Amino acid sequence: MAYYSEDLIDEILASTDIVEVVNEYVPLKRRGANYLGLCPFHKEKTPSFTVSADKQIYKCFGCGQGGTVIQFVSKLENLDFRETLETLAERANIDLEKYKTNTTVDPKKDLRDTILEINKSTARYFFDALTEEVKKEKSILKDYLIKRDLDSKTITRFGLGYGSKSSETLMAYLTRLGYKKEDILAAGVVSKNMRGDIYENFAGRLIFPIFDTRDRVIAFGGRVLDNSLPKYVNSPENALYHKGSNLYGMNVAKKEQLNSVIIVEGYMDTVAPHKSGITNVVASLGTAFTEKQAKLLKKYTDTVIISYDQDAAGQNATLRAIDILVKEGLKVKVLRLDKEDAKDPDEYIKKYGKERFEECVKKSISHIEYKISRMEKLLEDDNNFDNKVKFLSRAADILATLENDIEREMYVDTIAKKYNVSKAAIESEINKKIKKNVKEEKVVKVKEKVAERKEKGPLTLRKKQEEYIVAMLLGKDKKMINQVLDRFKERDFVYEDVRNLFIFLKELNNEQDITKINVLTRISDSDTLNLITEILAINLSDFDKDKLYTEMDKTFKKYYYQNRREEIFKELEKENISKDEKEFLEVELKQIMLKIAKMK
């Protein structure tokens, strides 16, 4: 297990240009000294995502996200800190061996790394078992592979394996390699029953290793070779594997230039198109599509074509996936197979071939058209007035979400002709829905702003001044840093987030120098990281630092005296205050009033 010294961080940040890295994910345009683009962390039409080549940081003024290239890659690729360092080091051709250390880290990370190692060994065990099994003259597995038209090239590409029932069990094999029983169980490659006996989850099954986008085995799926149940077993979620954060086949698909990605349900629905040369296909590991999977797709394409099964469950899942993908800002289409005797891509390609499947892909309809067509059942009886009203209302709901007026008008024209409904009626209903949506959005935005004010308070001059103090600590002037730390105390900070940051920097200074690298690489909390990035954007070169320090000193003292004055007033109003205490407070109050007067 590899851990790295802090020198690696310095080397990575010195060798990596954040503008180049970000530009690989987000198209950037130069605006003065900075670069501007659409934020990858939230949906927006007007660019508010800024990258500073000088400071080597990014900041979105829309959602508040910010940090160095390390935080950018970590958040966008969903990597932990160590994995991010390894990714960036590999990109910069940095020799990691020079920076290895024995520093101890989070035990949860230890477990994740151990599971990765166990999965890698398990995948090798399954692959070798398949290789040996197909050498036999008679084999159920061999017959199944021929039946499913799985050749050696496809088997190797996807790392397929076999849950052998050999003399050496998987448990025995992994134990022989030195893995602990509790770690093997935590990886989920074997299980324990109620009696405490270990059993093989994947015995007798065709194995589909699940890889992440870094080509690491994170889980397994296994299919029976006959008609027994359950048809599939899958790795349980654990410290490493979270089903809703990954896509089967994404590691293979992302190697190509992806103008679009076809998303399917199952393993074979992915493997079959790839074998035939259609390489932009991935599976959602079940039909419960998630926001994290949508974000993962967005990294590689802007168009997604959904090709779930044609049954009721698959079609309902399609509707759910559409909403998630559209919300993420992706263009969404739906692929409908033109033959009822093929419920999924695997069956269709086997029966009708690659070319015909590609024709279906070309004819994929927009998500709007798909949603409207799903409501056609309301019009089964043309004479049913209530059904026509329901259809018109629901179609208007869908069309009201369209932002492109031309596209909306085309749909209105189509619906009017196809369903014998007047264009005027449809347009009138759409306008009502749009006005209602706008009104609701305004109410939501007002509520959000009110809630934000209550939570954070207004960004007053006072907060800006507190941020200036922290900005001085993040500068390179050692004399000023010491001066600030000597003069200002925790009590001087009214805003909790800035106060906590000041405390953190003060404690850091007791251990080592306060530098941008030391600070940014030690903070994992996103809110604090965003605040740091915001403060780093303050250009102190625009100020006379000594003059600014003097002004801050005066302002903070005045604020403290004013607060203390109010506290004394409240103390003097108490009924049970003693005579001595009252006299003491009155003397203090007089001194404070004089100090405040001198500051005016």
Image (cartoon, helix red, strand yellow):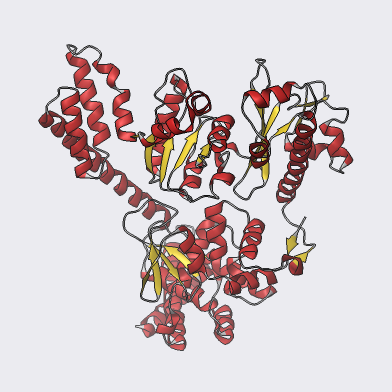
Q: Tell me where residue 330 appears, x and y as whole percent.
A: 39, 45
What residue is at 73 percent from the left and 41 percent from the top? Answer: 119
Task: Note whether 472 is above or below 187 in the view shown.
Answer: below
Q: How many marks?
A: 0
Quadrant position of residue 192:
top right
In the displayed structure, 425 sits above or below 524; it is: above
Location of the N terminus (image quadrant): bottom right
Picture coordinates of residue 270, whole percent (x, y): 55, 34
Where residue 299 appears, as percent x and y from the top left, is 48, 51
Q: Quadrant of residue 84?
A: bottom right
Tell me if residue 586 can be seen. no
Q: Position of residue 379 (x, y in %)?
A: 24, 17
Residue drawn 72% across the image and 45% down it:
116
Picture layout, residue 349 above or below residue 1:
above
Between 440 and 469, which is closer to the camera in this rendering? 440
Closest to the observer, 58 or 586: 58
Q: Nearer the viewer, residue 233 or 434?
A: 233
- Taking the spot 42% from the left edge, 53% from the top edge, the residue there is 455
In the depicted structure, whether residue 89 falls above or below residue 444: below
Location of the C terminus (image quadrant): bottom left
In the image, 281 versus 72, the foreground residue is: 281
**Residue 337 in view in this figure:** yes
